[in-house]
Image: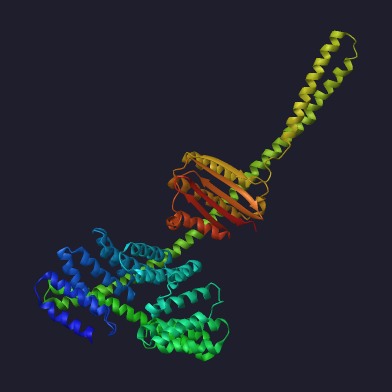
Amino acid sequence: MKKVDSIQKYELNTNITDSSTIANAHYKIGELYRYSVLGNLGDSAYYHYHKAEKIYKKLHNDYKLALTLYGIAVIQKDEKDFTGSEVNSVEAIALLDKLNQSNNVIRYKSFLYNNLGLLFDQLELYNESISYHKKSLDLKGELKGDTKSTIDNSKNNLALSYKNSGQYKLALDYYSQVLRNKNLINERPSFYALVLDNYAHTLYLSKSEDELPELYIKALKICDSLGDSAASYNSIIINQHLAEYYNGHNKKDSALFYAYRAKNISEQYHNDDLLESLLLLSKVEEGNVAVKYLKDYIKLNDSLQKAERTIRNKFARIKYETNQLEQENIKISKERLWLLIISMVVILASFLLYLVISQRNKNKELQFIQKQQETNEEIYNLMLSQNEGIEEARAQEKKRISEELHDGVLGRLFGTRLSLDSLNMNNSAEAIKTRSQYIDRLKTIEEDIRKVSHKLNTDFVSGSGFIDIIKTLVQTQAWAYHLKYKLDHDDAIHWYEVSNKKKIHIYRIIQEALHNIYKHANASKVTISFKLKNNVICLIISDDGSGFDVNKAKSGIGLKNMNSRIKEINGTINITSEKDVGTKVTIEAPIP
């Protein structure tokens, strides 16, 4: 009742004329509605926040405007208007960055980053979520005064993102940091139970179940002992986790007990927790009962999605209508309504048209990729055939020259040497000396021709066709990109055993890597090597360029193309890079 009286008091005081006071009154009413326990009053809070936002913009009060945008962003995040929440959060942070970094400014910046972390966690964009939670935690570390509670909140949120992203070790570390506070169970018992449950569930997901289900039961007992609405709400997820645990251990009776307990409590809220409870029951129950709960889940899911769209549309209408009331009068209300209807029809038609065009483009793109792959295969086969033809012709020509030297010239020289040898019977000292010199010279010629014949008859390029193609590629691109290069290859690799498809992808990966080095690395030298380890081809491409942040570059189109090709050949890729030192790309692909 106190909150109701406070809201009414502030609403009655909005008839004052001072703009700053009016804005403050609207902001305070928005805060009271947002924190109200009366139920879902998000639209009322949004209305007053929006009123305050407009006045603060006119007054150029960036601090109060940022606080108002934060309130709006939290409401939008809770109602799953994630785009709107992100836009308002980023705008509020930009406003606060321009101000003197006082304790309050830093405090609200940390709240905004925390909101972004929670938002991206719900979108399952965990890397972004973790980044924002870390920024929030860093800012809270700069705050003066008692910040233990708010830091614990951020650590719990950060650990949740790590858990949801599958990084269980890091999640457990942060949960442990929070739980080390021995007074937490007395100071914030409901929060303690929540963290303990999250810690236990992370242990379950990481297959470390030595302390389970005791930790779950301890957390549940704490919630049950408190008896307030917040603790009751937190117990929903604990009951769900217990049901999941017992179901995983094939203890159906216990699993059903906790699953139904979670459902019964979550029915009071009719939200995503009830949705999860229904889905859980569809997995624990059997036969027609499981089917019933699955149908209930689908029905509720559709209902919640419609409700969320309704709320988002309501927010849009509030903003739209309040702006219009300041600029227009009642006479054009019908025109506004028609404009809204026409806009919705146009948007719907545009959306449908976009879907059709987008689907066609996707189909064309898939067809293009298939044709390109076929063309690549054909080009590579032609390259192999051409190279094999050249090598075969070269080998035949060397063999012919070898036979000609051995059977023709070498035979004649041998006969001449025999003749001279027989004439050497002349006992004249000068004749013997002269003929001996001729014989030695002919022996030298004979030995030289024999060496040439032997070398020409050796097929030294046997089996090196693919490496020759790679060498041509590297030579050509290194010359075009003004790069020095070094190419090493392991003769133990039998390329004829490797499929053409795999060789095409390796060729394209090297081509893409050289292009990326030229475009981004500012390198002067590149080293490419092939090695064979346990029937796995290991390709290493390194440069002496400027290096880059590997985490930030994962979304680049070049790396996406390389990852796609590596996936096609069942391979793996590892990239290490250091600023001003260079980059090393290691790719492993099995031969079969």
Give residue 18's position: percent from left, percent from top.
Answer: 10, 71
| Residue located farthest toward the left when viewing the structure as drawn | 17
Give residue 501's position: percent from left, percent from top.
Answer: 59, 56
Above or below, comparing residue 150 to residue 253 in the picture: above
Query: Which is more toward the observer, 516 or 366?
Result: 516
Give residue 465's position: percent from left, percent from top.
Answer: 63, 45
Occupied quadrant, residue 209: bottom right
Occupied quadrant, residue 235: bottom left
Give the left or right position of residue 256, taking residue 227 as reference.
right
Query: Which is more toward the observer, 461 or 363?
Result: 461
Query: Number of numbered discs present?
Result: 0
Give the left or right position of residue 91, taking residue 520 as reference.
left
Of the 4 image quadrants, the one containing the N terminus is: bottom left
- On the question of residue 238 being in view, the answer is yes
Tell me the residue at 33%/81% (across/down): 307
- On the question of residue 123 being in view, the answer is no
Query: Which is more toward the observer, 560 or 63?
Result: 63
- How is colour applied across the structure in the image? rainbow
Query: Which is more toward the observer, 348 or 247?
Result: 247
Give the left or right position of residue 341, taking residue 284 as reference.
left
Tell me the residue at 32%/65% (across/down): 110
Give residue 517's position: percent from left, percent from top.
Answer: 47, 46
Of the 4 image quadrants, the one containing the C terminus is: bottom right
